[in-house]
Amino acid sequence: MKSNIKPAEGKLGILLPGLGAVATTLIAGVEAVKKGISQPIGSLTQLGNIRLGKRTENRNPKIKDFVPLANLNDIVWGGWDVYADNVYEAASHARVLEQHHIEAVKEELQAIVPMKAAFDKNYAKNLDGTHVKEGTRYELAQQLIEDITNFKEKNGLDRVVLVWCGSTEVYFEASDVHSSLEKFEQGLKNDDKQIAPSMLYAYAALKLGIPFANGAPNLTVDIPALIELAKETHTPIAGKDFKTGQTLMKTILAPGFEARALGVRGWFSTNILGNRDGLVLDDPDNFKTKEVSKLGVLEDILKPESNPELYGEIYHKIRINYYPPHGDNKESWDNIDIFGWMGYPMQIKINFLCRDSILAAPIALDLALFSDFAKRANMSGVQEWLSFYLKSPQTAPGLPAENDIFKQLIKLQNTLRYLMGEDLITHLGLDYYEELVESEQ
Amino acid sequence: MKSNIKPAEGKLGILLPGLGAVATTLIAGVEAVKKGISQPIGSLTQLGNIRLGKRTENRNPKIKDFVPLANLNDIVWGGWDVYADNVYEAASHARVLEQHHIEAVKEELQAIVPMKAAFDKNYAKNLDGTHVKEGTRYELAQQLIEDITNFKEKNGLDRVVLVWCGSTEVYFEASDVHSSLEKFEQGLKNDDKQIAPSMLYAYAALKLGIPFANGAPNLTVDIPALIELAKETHTPIAGKDFKTGQTLMKTILAPGFEARALGVRGWFSTNILGNRDGLVLDDPDNFKTKEVSKLGVLEDILKPESNPELYGEIYHKIRINYYPPHGDNKESWDNIDIFGWMGYPMQIKINFLCRDSILAAPIALDLALFSDFAKRANMSGVQEWLSFYLKSPQTAPGLPAENDIFKQLIKLQNTLRYLMGEDLITHLGLDYYEELVESEQ
Amino acid sequence: MKSNIKPAEGKLGILLPGLGAVATTLIAGVEAVKKGISQPIGSLTQLGNIRLGKRTENRNPKIKDFVPLANLNDIVWGGWDVYADNVYEAASHARVLEQHHIEAVKEELQAIVPMKAAFDKNYAKNLDGTHVKEGTRYELAQQLIEDITNFKEKNGLDRVVLVWCGSTEVYFEASDVHSSLEKFEQGLKNDDKQIAPSMLYAYAALKLGIPFANGAPNLTVDIPALIELAKETHTPIAGKDFKTGQTLMKTILAPGFEARALGVRGWFSTNILGNRDGLVLDDPDNFKTKEVSKLGVLEDILKPESNPELYGEIYHKIRINYYPPHGDNKESWDNIDIFGWMGYPMQIKINFLCRDSILAAPIALDLALFSDFAKRANMSGVQEWLSFYLKSPQTAPGLPAENDIFKQLIKLQNTLRYLMGEDLITHLGLDYYEELVESEQ
Amino acid sequence: MKSNIKPAEGKLGILLPGLGAVATTLIAGVEAVKKGISQPIGSLTQLGNIRLGKRTENRNPKIKDFVPLANLNDIVWGGWDVYADNVYEAASHARVLEQHHIEAVKEELQAIVPMKAAFDKNYAKNLDGTHVKEGTRYELAQQLIEDITNFKEKNGLDRVVLVWCGSTEVYFEASDVHSSLEKFEQGLKNDDKQIAPSMLYAYAALKLGIPFANGAPNLTVDIPALIELAKETHTPIAGKDFKTGQTLMKTILAPGFEARALGVRGWFSTNILGNRDGLVLDDPDNFKTKEVSKLGVLEDILKPESNPELYGEIYHKIRINYYPPHGDNKESWDNIDIFGWMGYPMQIKINFLCRDSILAAPIALDLALFSDFAKRANMSGVQEWLSFYLKSPQTAPGLPAENDIFKQLIKLQNTLRYLMGEDLITHLGLDYYEELVESEQ
């Protein structure tokens, strides 16, 4: 296995459609890490360890020392945005980082200037971007392909990956034009309004065999046409929606309740946040699509149909409230009504004073580095082992998503072990029961 | 494998040293379940499912339908206590259950009358039991062996297990008398004060080849002498301390932080409770031993030595406060200071309105049923796969404990799969990446 | 003054339009108190003290020993409802009280059977009452007058008061028909749909010189026509909306911030409740009227126009969420963003596990007893001194409401002192500064 | 009255024993306000309003426009400390203010250099100051008198006040040497160890007729000897302990419960803080004295002896925990168990993310300005009307303290109204009940 993985030589371009809060936090952080003045906290590729072999072997290397990942020093940044601000300006407006952290990498950030975006106001009514390309969908796709090609050549890059860091597009369901690559390419030529801008970026990347990961809840690469293209060009794809905040907590806690067969009668989740996301999601219509995706997480983990005594009557409610005093700091409050032995009720209340972009930035980094790694390891199509990072994991068609973050982690780690020729970990440890067996599996 | 497991035929005696809040809640609940008027919520053996084979096979039986466990209808209860109250009276005093739940099984509870306890006031200064045996430690052990033998014969039982549900004994460390079975048995004859009462119960059980599980933080079976005896008589043992409340939450949350490489700067845990446990632990001296055991959990999961950037400076503090207004309802409040990308701080505050005995009772049931199963499956010595249920898991000598509840669960489930001849689950699922491999492991 | 107050001799009838959760909790509680098996907690008339004279005099009698109030044993209950259930049945359905508390006064509750209600479905779309009167508004008013007269005669009552405990009616603003008594009485004859059912009860009461207090946010007696009638018949009136839960907390805390000149940048209030009120208020349209009334409380207390540096930018948001798992137990969570010296921010988070009817019942009792007292003391029109009990206090026309609960309390207490011929309390206490003055005022 | 108050002409010296976190925050803030770059939030003298006359008169001036207080521009700072750091250095070490706020007034802060302190290590075991005076207690007192006199002359001051901002001294009770001025002065000459250093500052001030306010829980001026001296020299005194944080919240909330006759069964208060105060108070012995003083607040407000049904069984517990991750940010968590109608329980949980020095600084300012005002208004001795600012108010001998912050506020405001010749406010407003009376009182 291991011998088939191409090494991470040369430079890696990371192209980000959407140079807003998440993207600028990501770039500023990596540049600060490269200068030795910050730590890439929250990034598994940079700080995570992986156990190898038996517990008694004490082999627990950093993931980045175990798997051939691109080095941070080899990263070259680029991106598109509907505003012409360079990354220094955009980071300052985003008000996620303290200004002195931005100043420390001012030069590096100023050098990154967005390319014009492929944009359609129907997909983001609250945005008034002027820094946009002109043309039909087909022409826009061609321009994006050119952008990527030029970026690669100009910077002398060995490889490129794309990670969508743009706004959430309006909700719509996949239709005929998304059902096959042929129809999709015909749709481009017809300038079919049902093709979202984010799909143009994905199409351009995949056409060039460049991995694409989607950090928003948009469909984007989660349509048959682009899955088909990913396979055709042997390209990894991953999505949807960076797993942060309240959903992250849910996918940690719910597996705990399920593990111990504790019942859940209700789960009330409220959020207050004061940034542009909060303003948009405060509107009942915009919130509806977000809500649908968020609600599924608990059902998937708790499986009410298999456990009707425990989860058959769960009442799950999510509210997002615009609250300007908190700015970019997203705060959540959860009330969880659980019940135990003989049905006796207990309550858990969780108040999370969270920072959304701070949690999202390392996810974007890991998705970029692992997607590049997957490409070099000859993996293509939907990378389900990356669902660990995603709120609404894209799976192979027909397969249910796994939302339990601990099963997602095992899948990620065992995938790495498998690819690197190491034994899988099952935590069985039967050799510790001397009389039964002799070797751990 | 499967063919070697003896079936769960005949009656199973469950003997409980300590018929207080946990034991009476357990018994009342099981009797109510047997009458069809309650549900054994929180019990994996009764309500938990286990996935078998690939995800696409949709095999997800109840554990009790997969593994040959004793049926609840075959259980016969018994126990010892320093008070002579029958279980109906003791349950009423404990004030855990609502009185109408106790009345519904009054007859069954009244029939269970404690045997006299083996007791030494030096190990529980706050108890003034009068319902106690007389004699040297050797004589007490012999009386306990007789108790068990008589109980088995009188009730026509096929098998027996013991689960310690008594109070926490005072802290002390293992010494010479505990270091080998020979020295231990000599110590019994010498009436050595360093042999705690709980060890007498464990000795009696193991001598008869009867499994023993320990629900308190006492050493009890966690000494070389009794591990030796367990192996000699091919008997399973497990311990220590039922995993409930705040520690349960910690072993759920901390793996989540570690999974995502989020740093932890501080974790402040405070508890308020108004029962006898609270009164005892409000004393700084008594609390010290509890604190030591509780503090280890985070260190074990977060491994500061491997992750100094993330966990090297963690400040972990635990406080237990006696607060009579809350009676048996234990409430905890945790303040967790985490940090993410570039070191930016976030806070999580958790308020758990918990009920301790309600969480402990199903654990005691599962430990009883799984210990009996282990005996029939020819497993002996320390059953590390049961660490899922325990705050301070006993391991094979020299092996570090695993406190991550999700790794504990995988170990438990893969142990069951292994014993029943099913494939282990690694969550690898590489066959979903069609071009790479062909069969899941 | 004192000599003009008529004594509380004979029986007092308390008639409640709306025999739902609040009314049945009130009645069951008073009956239990009369039997000596419960305490009227939360009732100032029953348990509150009042300081008289100087601090050093140590005169601090119970209010009921200071002011001539009706004795609980002299109360006779009656009411109207759109359902025919007697109070025992209605209390059982309301699920506020534990069943054993209801059973203890079963006989008394069963004896109270509602009269048919004056009802108009346009004012309460979610109610499908069948136990209703027929006729035009004029005829309904006449029937209510007869109901009251019959009730008084049949029970040999000396005096009667009405306290509205019915549902919140839909929002509407006062219009021409409400602008004078003459137009109102003409409107009755015309069966004018702009006259709400609650106004018919108030009209009937006031016409008979019977005090009326309003526990819901409906206009009801807060219209010129009925204020005019109240003065004409020398009758006290009070309203609107029992002050419970989150608003109670706000009118306690906000005066504290204002007292100390601490700034408030934001106040986010969310509620979860699972009763019928919650279901209704979960609808954005219904919630709007409630929200408007609740939002005013903070503005009134903090006075942003006088204190722009402190409260000029306050962002106040209230959310009510239907959450069935909590039933009648209303839970609120508040996040308050305050700031201090030099603008440094601080946060306060409050989680109130509240019971709405438990807080409302003693308010209804006090309003009944104080209204009766006011009548006997020859007070008429709007009783602003009772604003202590009300979320949205009705004031004399043109006067701003006082929402600070502590100023409301002083007003209530000084009113009682004044009426009973005692010195008012100013907390000046200058005689403690010997050199300055000689007598306290 | 008004005509007897001397105007606030000339310069006012504010001398602070203890130039630590509170004092430096105070000075930096006032200097920033003087430059127009900050607001004196939390200061009633600067931002508070006071209602005059009837509600309908709409007279609501700022307190500083109503009462002749010293202008901030006329303040000259000075102080003593056991460390030689100037105020710029001390403010930087305290880490209360963000550094850019300190830099903005760097020049002003650097100019303030502490005088050598009168110190006795027995009263503050954790302090190792070297910047201290030498001599017997009598000599130290003389040196302090000289310090003050020199400070006044050197700066051309019209008036001076002292506000104690030093550490809490160890606990001890008043004894014979404190019982009269004569014995106290003899004690000075005998270098009596029972005279605490803080008493030397107070003595020096009072001897010169300079007002003294005490921001710590030490006895200091709360002894007969110094009360006698205050009267002799016609000097105002006030104490003890700036009212901040959890106690501030208690004196806001408890009056609310008492107002509504809601019962309180338990109040559990825990604090986490990571500064030097936290470290000291984490020790059970040191905490004991703080606890005693804090516990009294609830009892005083709720008066269990007058209200045994409501407060007779209250269980009040306070814990302070050292928790370094939070540094100077003090966080508190309160669990309050209240009960209402028929005894039904409710819970309130409050999490206060507080900043201690930010709350204390404006109190110190107000105490300084009001003490100076009191002196000019010929008030002397204990200024009980300033108890609004104090955790453990000093009262005239034999008088119980008033801890209800709202009664304290009325006392403060009515005192100002009285001194300025305005009507006292009773909130009676009987003229709104037209038929009863004609003029408001």
Image (cartoon, coloured by chain):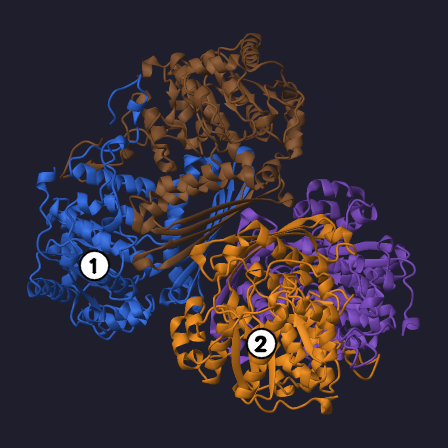
Chain colours: A blue, B brown, C purple, D orange
Badge 1: how crowded within 10 Å, few (<14), some, or many (20+)? many
Q: Residue C168's x, y, as percent?
A: 64, 62
Q: Can residue B119 be spotted in the picture?
A: yes
Task: Answer with left or right where residue D7 lies relative to residue B47.
Answer: right
Label at residue A199: 1
Quarter of the image that includes the N terminus of chain A: top left
At label 1, the amino acid type is Met
Residue at x-position 30% and y-position 65%: A21
Residue A378 vs A288, above or below: the answer is: above
Nearer to me, B26 or B383: B383
Label at residue D143: 2
The residues tagged by marks 1 and 2 sit, at their Cα atoms, a distance apart of 81 Å
Numbered disc in front, either 1 or 2: 2
The image quarter in which residue D441 lies = bottom right
- Subunit under mark 2: D
Residue C6 vs C77, above or below: the answer is: below
Residue at x-position 22% and y-position 42%: A61
Q: Residue B433's x, y, as percent?
A: 18, 40
Q: Residue D36's x, y, as percent?
A: 46, 84
Task: Answer with left or right where residue A99 lies relative to residue D420.
Answer: left
